[in-house]
Image (cartoon, rainbow, N blue to C red):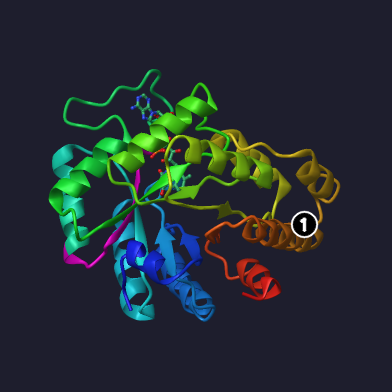
Amino acid sequence: MIKKISDIFREKERTFSFEFFPPKTQKGVDRLYETADELNRLVPDFVSVTYGAGGSSRGATMEICAEIQQRCDLTAMHHFTCVGHSQKELKNIINQMHDNNIQNILALRGDPPKEIDNWQPAPDEFHYCYQLIDLIKEIDKDFFSIGVAGFPEAHINCPDKETDTTYLKMKIDHGGEFVVTQLFFDNAVYSEYLERLKRAGVNVRVLPGILPITSYEGLIKFCNICGTTITPEVHDIFQPIRDDNESTREAGIEFAVRQCRDLLDLGAPGLHFFTLNKVEPTRAIWERLGL
Ligand SMILES: Cc1cc2nc3c(=O)[nH]c(=O)nc-3n(C[C@H](O)[C@H](O)[C@H](O)COP(=O)(O)OP(=O)(O)OC[C@H]3O[C@@H](n4cnc5c(N)ncnc54)[C@H](O)[C@@H]3O)c2cc1C
């Protein structure tokens, strides 16, 4: 049954969710639906689909969310960035979500184009995520459940963690109902983040984002872009086996299982897996967790 995530939270103390990205080809999209069918057997509470990240087509997110909801009877959350869209375009897309019964939005600013130094939005564009939240609320304050991105190590362009916390609080004060975090590998970083948010008066659920490591090279590239620290532990495990795909895959599963168990013991209100559109290793992690 399709639900608002805020309603799922009322029913469940912990949620488990899977994130997908829109593939570039129709064949890839068809494969993604097979993956969603497979992962649906694990009975996740919801799935999410990214928007425009990595150069994927933006329109595909809505199509995939709508199809997954119909085909799998599974709640889908539409990631939605405001960068590069006029307010009129944003309104049109939000209205289309409404028409497609997509009630859950991960509201995001998005990354400005890399080639532009000192990016400033055009006069009819938004600068920050909280403005997009205002627009969603203005269109229909009851229909949508809104999540926001959180950065336990602070957003890469933010001067420090306290400032990052202030901006996160703004997103919640404007209507963000929960947080999905950027990946991190040190659970103490997550605990400290929760403490900081609590001190700032943020009391919403903070779902940790979990990336199963499948490639050390890929990890370094991604962490350089998003600012996640590769801890000495991660380096020591994965650097020596960087050329051995099978060992990396197995070590990635083991590491994620340990990290997830510890997070749940710390009281995390669920887990959000970045699946990279693959059934494995997420399924293996899930099965070993025994959830
Ligand atoms: C779980 C998750 C999912 C994501 N999914 C996608 C996706 O699908 N597609 C995609 O393109 N990207 C995605 N991203 C990346 C995200 O779009 C970028 O990290 C983006 O740069 C920040 O988005 P935001 O919503 O946090 O922006 P904001 O909260 O608006 O912050 C943007 C920047 O402005 C600063 N800031 C915020 N408010 C203010 C203010 N009031 N005054 C001054 N400065 C301020 C912040 O410190 C930050 O540096 C995702 C990130 C996460 C963690």
Q: Quadrant of ligand 1?
A: top left
Q: Residues within 10 Å of mark 1 (few under 14, many from 20)?
A: many
Residue 279 is left or right of residue 130, and the answer is: right
Is residue 111 visible in the rendered structure shown here? Answer: no
Q: Is residue 110 magenta?
A: yes
User: The C terminus lies in which quarter of the figure?
Assistant: bottom right
- Residue depicted at x 40% and y 72%: 11
Q: Residue furthest right?
A: 240
Q: Of 264 and 57, which appears nearest the observer?
A: 264
- Tell me the quarter of the picture where residue 65 sits: bottom left
User: For mark 1, what is the residue?
Assistant: 248
Q: Is mark 1 within 8 Å of ligand 1?
A: no
- Residue depicted at x 36% and y 70%: 75
- Residue depicted at x 51% and y 39%: 151
Q: In this picture, is 171 found above or below 141?
A: above
Q: Is residue 77 magenta?
A: no
Q: In this picture, is 198 found above or below 260?
A: above
Q: Position of residue 172 (x, y in %)?
A: 35, 42
What amino acid does circle 1 point to?
A: Thr
Q: In this picture, is 112 found above or below 176?
A: above
Q: Position of residue 79 (x, y in %)?
A: 36, 52
Secondary structure beneath dot 1 equals: helix
Is residue 116 visible in the rendered structure shown here? Answer: yes
User: The N terminus lies in which quarter of the figure?
Assistant: bottom left
Magenta segment: 99-111
Q: Residue furthest top?
A: 118
- Tell me the quarter of the picture where residue 192 sits: top right
Q: Position of residue 246 (x, y in %)?
A: 78, 63
- Tell me the quarter of the picture where residue 249 sits: bottom right
Q: Of 170 and 76, which appears nearest the observer?
A: 170
